[in-house]
Amino acid sequence: MYERFIARQPILDARLKLFGYELLFRAREDNRAGADPKATSQLIVSSTMVFDWNTLLDGVCAHINFGAEEITNGAGLLLPSAKTVVDVPPTLEFTDEIIQGLKNLRTAGYRIALDGYARESAVERVLRYMNFVKVDFTGTAEADHAAIKKLAADWQIKLIGKKLETWKDYEKAKLMGCAYFQGHFFLEPQLLKRREISGSAAHCMQLLQLVHQRPMDQSKIEDVLKQEPALLYKLLRFLNSPVMARPVEVKSVHSAISLLGDDEFRRWASLVAVVVPATDKPNELIRTALTRAFFCEALARAKTRRATTFEYFTVGLFSVMSAILDRPLADITAELAVSEKVRDALEGKRNEMRYALDAAVAFESGKWDAFAAAMEGLEMAEDGAPELLKNAELLVAGLQV
């Protein structure tokens, strides 16, 4: 077991009532910020699977800093869009890929804040996607205040004054037109800690074996989860997370299966069992697995089904399992009670699920002849697939575990 840390700093409205918290990754208990390339990913995992999101935020929104990687790789998939504000640094190189990522986040319902003012055309080209601009009062000249106020009015953006150290700073921020206020003068970041139990790949593999059996043996699933508290905790935490929007709290494996149904439970249990042992893998690998899974599932829903949508989902999700578990895919599938069609598809044999996976892989790499051939194998029109893939990417743009 080891401890996870999150610092949170309140953001107040003009009446000094709580509007939201900026959540900050902390690696140690000394509450000092440190450079960590995985800070955002670790913060997302901690806030949704280690800490209780609702207790952490107390009903208000969370501001979380995203870099270029998180904007483009779908690192927010567990964060509820209605309660999350994505903070974007103005120092990013706003490439076409980054701008498309911002568009996807807005389409998925997230609000976005430009975390600092910069008088540059590269920054101004993304203002249309911003809901907020944060103004750093320790690094912004007073001569720029009027320009910032006009910018906010022109783009109908709300201003957040940050790093306010004195009441004088607060009054200046109000005169500038700031709607929200943040700084050590009100409250320094509060450090929260929670002990996390690490998960083992062996128990994740056992869970995969059990959920793919038909019928599922609930008692055996519960036995495995009792041996692996981290896996049970993360599964139940995920099923109770705001992104699921479940009206009834899931408290056990039995209640989860009853509420979700067998295949829906299999779907989410498989996702958690694949992602938990992949914490040391590149984010792009997880993004690829999730996108393929949701896209293959969407293809199954869009046509006459000859297999369950879960089987299509499984083929997409497992297509990168060898890289996640560092084992040959044939060895992995040999241990799982997947259907013969799923195993055939993963081994490259031609069937509808394999065509769906081929379509996903071809689209990723821009191999349009191969994509057309895969869609022909599915007996589906090509023109509908891009929209299905876009929807899959939007799901991932909200859910990285």
Image (cartoon, rainbow, N blue to C red):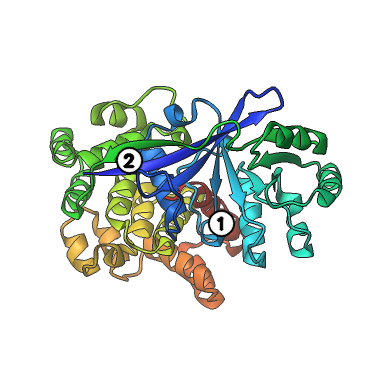
Specify whether residue 401 is in view. no
Residue shown at 46% from the left, 52% from the top? 40
Q: Amino acid at mark 1?
A: Ile
Amino acid of disc 2: Asp
Q: Secondary structure at mark 2?
A: helix
Sooner in the amino-acid sequence: mark 1 or mark 2? 1
Q: Residue at x 39, y 48 (%)?
A: 309
Is residue 278 or residue 378 the one in the foreground? 278
Asked if marks 1 and 2 touch (Cβ < 8 Å), the reply is: no
Q: Report the side of 136 relative to 343 (left or right).
A: right
In the image, residue 286 above or below residue 347: above
Q: Is residue 382 visible?
A: yes
Residue 360, image x, y percentages: 47, 64
Mark 2 closeness class: few <14, some 14–19, many ≥20 residues within 10 Å: some
Percent x, y of residue 391: 56, 51
Tell me if residue 235 comes above or below residue 271 in the rendering: above
- Spatial CA distance of label 1 from label 2 is 31 Å
Disc marking residue 89: none
Q: Nearer the viewer, residue 52 or 187?
A: 187
- For marks 1 and 2, give the one nearer the viewer: 1
Give the quarter of the image for residue 181: top right
Q: Residues within 10 Å of mark 1 (few under 14, many from 20)?
A: many
Q: How many marks?
A: 2
SS class of the residue under badge 1? helix
Pick the quarter of the image with the N terminus: top left
Q: Position of residue 206 (x, y in %)?
A: 16, 49
Q: Nearer the viewer, residue 245 or 384?
A: 245
What is the x, y in percent for residue 75?
48, 53
Residue occupied by mark 1: 71
Tell me where residue 95 sits by quadrant.
bottom right
From the image, tell me which residue sits under label 2: 263
